[in-house]
Amino acid sequence: MTDDLIFTTGLRYIYSDLFDSEFTPRVYLVYHLNDNIALKGGVSKGYKTPAAKQLTNGYYNYANNNAYFGNPDLKPEESINYESGVDFMVFDFAHYSITGFITDFTNQISSEDLTGMQNDINCSNGIVCKRPINLGKTQTKGIEFAFNTKTYNGFSLNSSYTFMDNRYKDGQKNWFGGDRIENLLRHIAMLKLNYERGKFSSYIKTRARLDTIAKAKGGGNGSLPWQKYKPFYIVDLGINYKINKQSSLSFAVQNLFDKNFFDPQVTRWDGANPAGYANRYQDYTEGRSFWLSYKYDF
């Protein structure tokens, strides 16, 4: 439109032989107040069809004490997203971004935990069983902050934080009587310190997921002994050496401090004997792991 005002639009056609096909338009506007500050905003429509495996009548994957079941009644997820924000530079050293958003969902795809015997799998004895479900009408409101610095003496910093408030909008309640949606976290944070020197580069990164309402087990047939899952914190480390223009060698350590994310607690009793367990953490994450890779660009 002008050098300072940029308008973009797009239209996507999503074809599915299992569900209705759909057009998803989007419009976005960016206005540069000056060289350091830009205002932005837009509206977009979303349409997400379930993966074919999610429609399986039974379980489609079992690994590491996690069993994933399908749901043949699963419907496509539809959404409309509204967002606005501002990007700005500070002293030509750091870039900031602040974005607020509201997303209205219909048939939002989420998951529920299962208990008992499911297709010959005992989901109550240390095995986590999950099945996708639709949530009906829901709304997510949130704000995102991002902060990235330029490199100074080899060091740079990347960080981000997202706050999300997820609510039922069709009168549905969670097990605890509120309208917050279960299994969806409220806070996500990331902090990454980078270092570069010649052909050598490295990073150390920490991530956190906090404040997640627990989903009742068995699709609402019983409650957990706790209202929220335990907070999730993890630290990763990576090192890269560029051998030449075409090749590089990388080494990474995931879950650097070998944090244990399996904390089983009794959820059901058969007289004096435990009859069911659930993990205090929302998801099981593996312990410390090491990765060595070689990359060659042709």
Image (cartoon, rainbow, N blue to C red):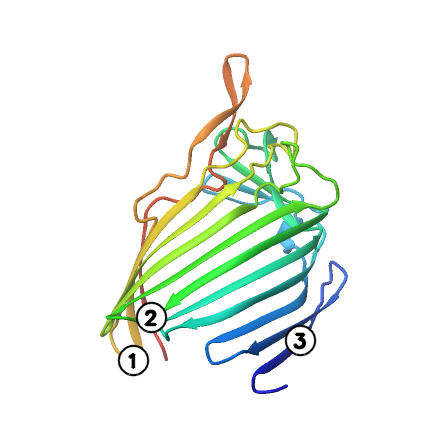
Query: Residue 10 occupies which quadrant of the picture?
Result: bottom right
| Residue 139 falls left or right of residue 157 | right
Q: Categorize mark 3 by other alpha carbons within 10 Å: few (<14), some (14-19), many (20+).
A: few
- Viewer-closest of 223 and 3: 3
Residue type at mark 1: give it.
Lys
**Which residue is painted at 67% across and 58% down in the image?**
49
* Location of residue 35 in the rendering, given as x and y in whole percent from the top left corner: 47, 80
* Location of residue 167 in the rendering, given as x and y in whole percent from the top left corner: 65, 45
Residue type at mark 3: give it.
Gly
- Viewer-closest of 156 and 13: 156
Q: Which residue is mark 3?
A: 10
Name the residue furthest top: 271
What is the distance, in whole Å, between disc 3 and disc 1 at their CAs? 37 Å
Of the residues under marks 3 and 2, which one precedes in the sequence? 3
Q: Give SS at disc 3.
A: strand
Q: Categorize mark 1 by other alpha carbons within 10 Å: few (<14), some (14-19), many (20+).
A: few
Residue type at mark 2: give it.
Lys
Q: Is residue 103 visible?
A: yes
- Viewer-closest of 68 and 96: 96
Q: Which mark is residue 297?
A: none
From what the image shows, is residue 286 above or below residue 147?
above
From what the image shows, is residue 215 above or below residue 159?
above
Name the residue furthest bottom: 2
Q: Which residue is mark 2?
A: 295
